[in-house]
Amino acid sequence: MKYNHITVAGSGVLGSQIAFQTAFKGFNVSVYDINDDALEAAKDRIMELKSRYQEDLKASVEEVDSAYNRISFSSDLAKAVSEADLVIEAIPEVVQIKIEFYKQLAKVAPEKTIFATNSSTLLPSQFAEATGRPEKFLALHFANEIWTNNTAEIMKHPGTDMKVFDDVIEFAKAIGMVALPLHKEQPGYILNSLLVPFLEAAQMLFLKEVADPETIDKTWMIATGSPKGPFAILDVVGIKTAYNISLTKAEADVPGFDKLAEKLKKEYIDKGKLGRETGEGFYQYPNPSFLEPDFLKK
């Protein structure tokens, strides 16, 4: 199946990036979110992405403008998916919200439409029944800053049709991704199976007051040669995402995560410090201290 029209449901940090990258590669894209305020914020995010593409990919003004012009925005789900060959869901990482969304989507999407979840930590089999079309449902997971960190992890569940799996792999390549097929369900896929425990270990060191974020990042950067430490990565991922993951673990009675969720909420989210997107998280942007030439020397 050839995909022509793509709908991205959820216009947060990653949803906006998926929409713009897909449009940049020539596809028509509809962006859906629950209200006009969310869509206005998405338009602002995407306008900012235009300059990042020019800076990082040396894209021309004409290329980024025509990409933007291929995107439409709607808070009416039926309208947003009316022509969709593929819907990529990038809504909050909360099981009940996703289940309700898929039940609603199943009622209004054309029969041909494939559904894909961009969930970072949840499994497609958790939502397959709610989609009403389990054979046309799978996971398609992107990394943040998709235009340079161009991984696409495609993960099927036991009921996914192999043709759908293969088609989504081809679509991922068509939007400039390195397609990484996963043949069995794995919470966190490959990337987050490695990344989430790493980020959680760093947050626990901070929670226990072993060291501050700068010291923890500095340790990692010097010892491994990595360009970013865990807290710099968390600022890119978004502190709300880290909070939602912590909350899910706290509800499952995993020790320490109730206190971590509380700390992230009180000291960061309630103060509007959501990470790079808002100009402040664990660091201040656009000039965070970890980019200073002497950061690793002092």
Image (spheres, rainbow, N blue to C red):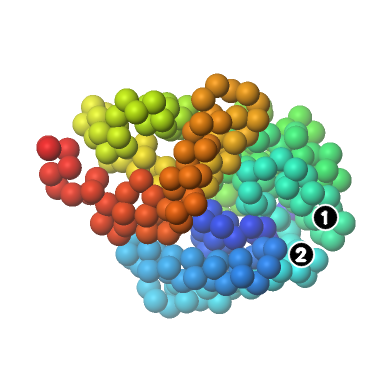
Residue 31, x across and y down, in percent: 64, 65
Residue denoted by label 1: 104
- At which x and y percent is residue 284? 31, 54
Whether tag 1 and tag 2 are in contact, CB under 8 A, the answer is yes
| Quarter of the rendering containing residue 157 | top right
In-image side of 38 versus 294 (left or right): right
Is 218 situated left or right of 199 in this image? left
Residue at image coords 29%, 29%: 211
Vertical placement of 280 versus 153: above or below? below
Q: Residue at x 47, y 38 (%)?
A: 263
Q: Amino acid at mark 1?
A: Gln
**Does any portion of residue 31 appear in the rendered image?**
yes
Q: Quadrant of residue 286?
A: bottom left
Outermost residue, front side:
266
| Disc 1 secondary structure class | helix
Percent x, y of residue 200: 46, 30
Of 150 and 97, nearer the camera is 97
Q: Nearer the viewer, residue 251 or 150?
A: 251
Circle 2 crowding by C-alpha within 10 Å: few under 14, some 14–19, many from 20: many
Query: Where is residue 199, by image quadrant?
Result: top left
Q: Which residue is mark 2?
A: 77
Quadrant location of the C terminus in the rendered image:
top left
In space, the residues marked 1 and 2 are separated at their CA atoms by 8 Å
Q: Nearest the camera: 117 or 220?
A: 220
Which numbered dot is residue 8?
none
Indicate the amino acid at tag 2.
Answer: Leu
Q: Secondary structure at mark 2?
A: helix
Counting residues from the N terminus, which is met first, the one under dot 1 or under dot 2? 2
Q: Residue at x 68, y 68 (%)?
A: 35
